[in-house]
Amino acid sequence: MFMTVALSFVFPKNDEKYLGDLFWTKKTFAPSDYNIVIMGDSRTYRGISPDIMQEFLPDMKILNFAYSNGGLNHTMFNAAEEKLVDGNNPKIIVLGISPNTVTGFSSKNDQYFQELGRSREEILERLYLYPILYWFSPTSLEELVNKIKEKKEVFYYRNTFHMNGYMESEKYPVDTLEAIPYYEDDFAQYKVEEENINDLLQQVKTWNNQGIKVLAFRPPVSVPMKMLEDSVGKYDEYRIKKGIEESGGYWIDLAQGNYKTYDGSHLDVESAEKLSVKIAEKIEALAKQDSY
């Protein structure tokens, strides 16, 4: 028994299976006690770290509530609002408005409903057994030998799961054009829809009237990706920014050149940390102005 436990600290671990599944369950079923809830798609959950933000906002609880192909629509508005603490201030929603969040592509919120619809038994297994099973992950002889020899990976794509909803992602080699073909296919069928923008702006007004402050930004991408989104995807950043501000929200301008991606679409770790600082500083500045 002692030997088994000792070896569990040496053997390779299946992060994607055990920590990944736990990550999505904890995010989906997070309690209603957060001051700041962050919404968006994979660019946002791979791009904003609550831990980094809390270095500037130590008295606030922060949840990254973004999903793969996550939509900014009524389903997710309601779900995010339910994560806010009841009867306490401040209450803040942060929106990562990428083109896909306001197209028909993300309207079904597939991943959110997949996680929400899991059985009670599976949810409990993930929450209480996976943290233990993780240490006894099945492995192969090859994986074990590579681990012992500390064999350097030539190619890798690694995710580090933070249970506050942030997924720290690294990829080597970097290819900033990798994601372009996928988005070309998406934009061939889906564009940014005016109806979705109007619904989003109306929600910002509603939150503002309820005392919930809203900050929004466009997740940084590579220059070719931005050009594709603005042209084929019909993303009008100025129109969205103006609408957010007229609805009572705050827009965070980002210099795209200050951030780097590993695939043209998702930020590398250093840039994700930089973006997290930028957003936290904006919230901190608003607090000092007694804006909320």
Image (cartoon, helix red, strand yellow):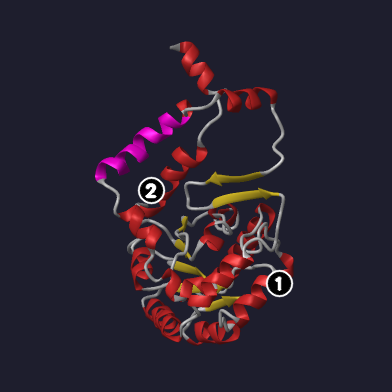
- Disc 1 residue type? Val
Which residue sits at x=64%, y=56%? 273
Q: Is residue 130 found inside the magenta-colored segment of the image?
A: yes
The x, y position of residue 4, in whole percent, is 47, 15
Q: Is residue 203 left or right of residue 41?
A: left
The magenta region covers 120-134
Give the residue number, with chain letter if any, for mark 2: 25
Q: Is residue 258 left or right of residue 108?
A: right
The x, y position of residue 223, in whole percent, is 71, 72
Above or below, 83 against 149 in this view is: below
Q: Secondary structure at mark 2?
A: helix
Above or below, 259 against 252 in this view is: above
- Disc 2 residue type? Thr
Q: Secondary structure at mark 1?
A: helix
The x, y position of residue 181, in whole percent, is 61, 67
Give the residue number, with chain letter if any, for mark 1: 223
The x, y position of residue 252, in whole percent, is 60, 74
Examine the residues drawn in magenta and state their main secondary structure: helix
Does residue 141 appear anywhere in the picture?
A: yes
Above or below, 167 against 101 in this view is: above
Q: Is residue 242 found inside the magenta-colored segment of the image?
A: no
Specify few, some or many for label 2: CA neighbours under 10 Å numbering under 14, 14-19, or 20 or more. many
Mark nearer the N terminus (2 vs 1): 2
Q: Nearer the viewer, residue 84 or 47?
A: 47
Which residue sits at x=72%, y=40%? 154
Does residue 84 appear anywhere in the picture?
A: no
Residue farthest top in this picture: 2
